[in-house]
Amino acid sequence: MSEIPLNKFEKEKKVIELHKQGKTIRQIAPEVHMAFRDISKKIKAYDKKIRLQQTKKEIENNQSNKMTKLSLRTQAFKLFQKGTKLTDVVIELESPADKVEKLWSQFLKLERMDECYEFYKDYQYDIPILLSINNFMKKNNISGNNIANVLREANGVNNLNQTHSNLKAEIEGLKQMKNNYLLNKNTNYLPQLLPLGLPTYYYEQF
């Protein structure tokens, strides 16, 4: 029974397998039924790929060894430049979280981004609301000055509400003072019961 001929991909795989076993092109050719030139191309492409992988691995190992010789600050800054998360930096450098956060703050200051970080720490839970306001402004073509004017008006309304509350409290106090006066105007203890601040002619009537 004759063998089923190999397809193109099977032949390429067979060439590499035999090459890895140390066989020459002359020995490989009869098994895969390919020309010497085609076998040579496949082997050269494979060897080049292996060399590139080895070179890449060596570079990565050298970089890793170099990183271990750097100070903690330098290692952290390099990771921050790559956009590595704080949690991952803590894990990779095996350093306390508060120390990494301090280095992160220093890094941002050097990058002139410390104000953004401080803003994030203070308003991180308000960011969704701020983003909603920003989207509303964009959709309705509203400028920052318009929002500032609205906020000033809102502040004026708050002040008016506070003034109104204060006046209501004062009116209630005056009503109480009036009630006290009416209840006690026929007694001999009026001067003691009258609230402070009443005109002196109230006292002179008794």
Image: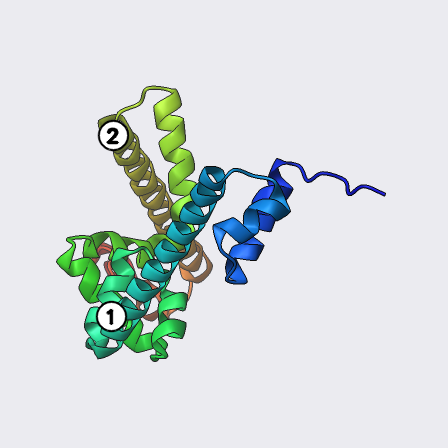
Q: In the displayed structure, does residue 51 sit left or right of residue 3?
A: left
Residue at the right extreme of this rendering: 1
Residue in the picture at 32% in, 71% down? 192
* Quarter of the picture holding the N terminus: top right
Q: Position of residue 64 (x, y in %)?
A: 30, 70
Q: Position of residue 165 (x, y in %)?
A: 38, 46
Instruction: Label 1: state its secondary structure.
Output: helix
Q: Amino acid at mark 1?
A: Gln
**Residue position for label 2:** 144
Q: Nearer the viewer, mark 1 or mark 2?
A: 1
For residue 173, say whether it is visible: no
Residue in the picture at 24% in, 51% down? 116
Label 2 CA crowd tier, 10 Å (few <14, some 14–19, many 20+) = few
Viewer-side residue, 164 vs 27:
27
For residue 37, say whether it is visible: yes
**Residue position for label 1:** 75
Q: Amino acid at mark 2?
A: Gly
Q: Position of residue 117 (x, y in %)?
A: 27, 56
Q: In the displayed structure, does residue 146 sit left or right of residue 89?
A: left
